[in-house]
Image: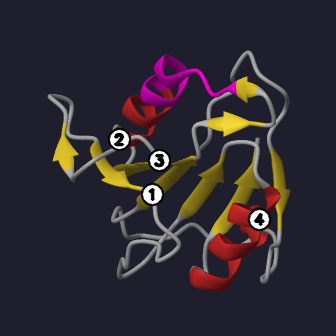
Amino acid sequence: MIPSLPMKEALQVFAARADASAEPEQTSTYRNFLIIAPGTVGAATVPDEKVVALARHLNQEGYAYVARRNQKEMEDDSSGVRYLPLSHQLPAFGVMTAVIVIGDPLWAALSAATYPEADIFLM
């Protein structure tokens, strides 16, 4: 479940499958979440502390990854969140549960093409 944030309401976009709420409860607890934080949205800077807080929350439900432009190399923080450099070749995972893109519809479209089984959110 994606937590509510004091930002604009998240919108599910580019869904290539039926609404996840209509699916039967899955028995697997293996879940991957990717947050794509390009660094800026127009002239505004994406607040890194909110991205980190969201990633740490999602990490309680599965594995959280954050791809961001200012990340030089892969690293893990003390809570287990993995930070990755952002590039047009998105990371390969076995199964992606959800991708949250901060403010960039082009990254959301690329995410939908890369992870057709995932729910894609543009915030």
Q: Position of residue 115 (x, y in %)?
A: 58, 79
Residue that mark 2 sits on:
59
Q: Nearer the viewer, residue 71 or 66?
A: 71
Q: Measuring 36% from the left and 77% from the top, which residue is drawn there? A: 93
Q: Secondary structure at mark 3?
A: loop
Which comes before the other along the chain, label 3 or label 4?
Answer: 3
Which comes before the other along the chain, label 2 or label 4?
Answer: 2
Q: Secondary structure at mark 4?
A: helix
Magenta stretch: helix, strand or loop mostly: helix
Q: On the picture, is 76 further left or further right than 86?
A: left
Which comes before the other along the chain, label 1 or label 2?
Answer: 2
Q: On the picture, is 30 further left or further right than 74?
A: right
Residue that mark 4 sits on:
106
Which comes before the other along the chain, label 1 or label 3?
Answer: 3
State the mark number for residue 69.
3
Within 10 Å of disc 3 (Cα), the crowding (few <14, some 14-19, many 20+) is some
As measured in the structure, the alpha-carbon distance from the residue carrying label 3 to the one carrying label 4 is 15 Å
Mark 2 or mark 3, which is nearer to you? 3
Which comes before the other along the chain, label 4 or label 1?
Answer: 1
Mark 1 or mark 2, which is nearer to you? 1
State the mark number for residue 86.
1
**Looking at the image, do the residues carrying marks 1 and 3 touch, with CB atoms under 8 Å apart?**
yes
Q: Measuring 36% from the left and 55% from the top, which residue is drawn there? A: 85
As measured in the structure, the alpha-carbon distance from the residue carrying label 2 to the one carrying label 3 is 21 Å
